[in-house]
Image (tube, rainbow, N blue to C red):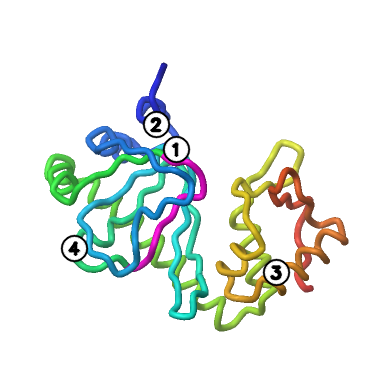
Amino acid sequence: MPTPLDRFTADPQHSEGVRALAARGDVRRYRKGSILIQEGDTGDTMYILLDGRVKVYCTEEGGREIMFGLFGAGEYFGEMALDGGPRSASVATLEDCVCSVVTRAGLLAFISERPEFALELLAQVIRRLRLATRDARNLAFIDVYGRLSQCLQDLAEPRPDGTRRIPARLTHQDLASRVGCSREMVSRILKDLESGGHVRLEDRHIVLVGRLPRRW
């Protein structure tokens, strides 16, 4: 029976470089709710997600959580701390996960053999920086509905019937943490969107029935 690593390295939807690097890592399993990375800690490992989903977030002193993103199979995280600096965010599993854990020494050895992977790694960092800049701009200039609408559409994946479904089972608090507002506000907006036939719930997954209204 193929292992998660076997399935991952055989899947052409993941880049050849990431598949080759994953094959060199230490494969580990984590239960739902496990903290893989703690903000502020120092570390010398990066994680390649072979199976499952994780969230990236920070927690304020008062306990309020701000979510930065959701990662699925094929994504990697933790690479920012390979310079020896502190972790800039926390990462927790949303379901049972399997990861290939690569040390700083292992990554450097891989890049020395395959220098083109450094460009792939840099492109990923740049992409995430652009998304972070966009999110910061949205917090400053776009209202809550606009941020929530954009978030839902970014997360949703198209289906053959024309609808779009968010793979992760997100709570209203998860969405509130991601867009920077209260859980009550998210609940009100989603209730109105559901009443208007724009979204529906299927087994706790949010489904976008059509294009969301431009205004709420």
Residue type at mark 2 is Phe
The location of residue 205, given as percent across then percent down, is 69, 48
Residue type at mark 1 is Asp
- Closer to the eye: label 4 or 1: 1
The residue at which mark 3 appears reads as: 186
The residue at which mark 1 appears reads as: 51
- Indicate whether residue 89 is drawn in magenta: yes
Instruction: Give the alpha-carbon distance from disc 4 to disc 1, as whole Å.
Output: 26 Å
Residue 124 or 41: which is nearer the viewer?
Answer: 41
Residue type at mark 3 is Val
4 or 1: tag closer to the N-terminus: 1
- Badge 2 crowding class, 10 Å Cα cut-off, few under 14, some 14 to 19, many 20 or more, is many
Q: Element type at marker 4?
A: helix
- Badge 4 crowding class, 10 Å Cα cut-off, few under 14, some 14 to 19, many 20 or more, is few
3 or 2: tag closer to the N-terminus: 2
Q: Are marks 3 and 2 in contact (CB under 8 Å)?
A: no
The residue at which mark 2 appears reads as: 8
Q: Which mark is residue 205?
A: none
The location of residue 1, given as percent across then percent down, is 41, 16
- Closer to the eye: label 3 or 2: 3
Q: Are marks 1 and 2 in contact (CB under 8 Å)?
A: yes
Q: Element type at marker 1?
A: strand
Q: Element type at marker 2?
A: helix
Instruction: Give the alpha-carbon distance from disc 1 to disc 3, as whole Å.
Output: 29 Å
- Badge 1 crowding class, 10 Å Cα cut-off, few under 14, some 14 to 19, many 20 or more, is many
Q: Which residues are magenta?
A: 88-97
- Residue at image coords 62%, 55%: 170
- Residue at image coords 64%, 58%: 171
1 or 2: tag closer to the N-terminus: 2
Residue 132 or 53: which is nearer the viewer?
Answer: 53
Query: Which quadrant does the C terminus fall into?
Result: bottom right
